[in-house]
Amino acid sequence: MSQDWQQLNTDVIALLKEARQNVLQKMRNPLTVAEKTNRKDLVTNVDKANEQFLIAGIRRLDPTAQVLGEEGFGDHLTSLQGRVWIVDPIDGTMNFVKQQDNFAIMIGIYQDGVGQLGYIFDVMNNVLYHGGPQLGGVWANERPVSAPADIALADGLIGASGPLVIHDVAHMQKIVHDSAGMRISGSAGIEMINIMKGETLGYISHLKPWDIAAGQVLMNTLGVQVSTIDGQPLDMLSSNLVLVATKKAQRDILQIEEDDVSL
């Protein structure tokens, strides 16, 4: 890894640790909660304040980069040329509001459209998963993370979006039926962590760039496949129906989509 990337990684870790402390401090006070698109799509004063804090820090660290943030405090991007930071200040806001647990702070750093560094901070457990091509691996704090076992769909649990299964979008009921079982965490970041820990073999959900940017870098580094539900590369500037899975499970799921069958 070049000295520039090494220093950037050190600085990002410091920024995220400070962001975590800010979030924990704000959690001691009543939250201001608002709806974005509906009653299940929430935003809080902490989401907004944390994104503003992170973007200010990124501007100091990397003044020429563009920043895409969930709450709109970054730039309006039309391409991924140059260096682009993609920020989710609180991933799993409903969990944050209702549980005060199972949420993450996430940053993905891309260079000319290619993921270079990814960070998923499990705030309440104080574990920062970070890595990418520029680090040559993935770490949970200081501990190296091994690639998860490449198991087939039938042999493992799968993370899923509840509404996709309820409405049987993209044959989700068949996919879940063929797996060993379904788990729902309510946070894309936590779902990525479950995959890295080997607790699940994959995850399927409608995701926006900030939901998957960090996870895609970490998953790719560990040999886990990230694609659309029909196996195509993600468009990192739009919403996608995303399939994250081991190679064997991805093949199984793509076969279900190709067969176009349902229960």
Image (cartoon, rainbow, N blue to C red):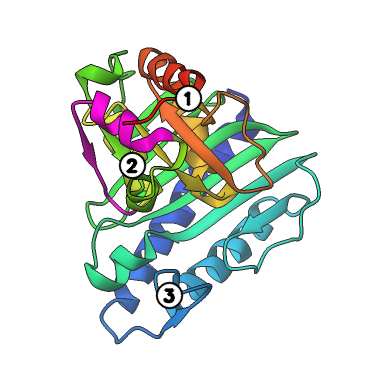
Look at the image and say whether residue 180 sits in the magenta stretch. yes
Identified by mark 2, the residue type is Ala
Q: Which mark is residue 99?
A: none
Q: Is residue 2 above or below residue 205?
A: above
Please give the name of the residue rendered at 23% of the width and 18% of the height, measured from the top-left corner: 154
Q: Residues within 10 Å of mark 3 (few under 14, many from 20)?
A: many
Which residue is under mark 3?
46
For mark 1, what is the residue?
Answer: 260
Cβ–Cβ under 8 Å for marks 1 and 2: no
Residue 40 percent coordinates (x, y): 39, 70
Q: Find the magenta span and give its range.
A: 171-186
Query: Gap in Å between the C-alphas at discs 1 and 3?
Result: 43 Å
Picture residue at 46% right of the left edge, 70% below the top: 47
**Disc 3 residue type?**
Val
**25 or 183, which lies in front?**
183
Amino acid type, mark 1 = Asp
Q: What secondary structure is found at the residue carrying circle 1?
A: loop
Spot occupied by residue 87 in the image (x, y as percentages of width and height): 56, 54
Is 35 positioned to the left or the right of 187 in the image? right
Q: Which residue is mark 2?
A: 160
- Residue 125 against residue 262 in the figure, above or below: below
Give residue 13's position: percent from left, percent from top.
Answer: 45, 47
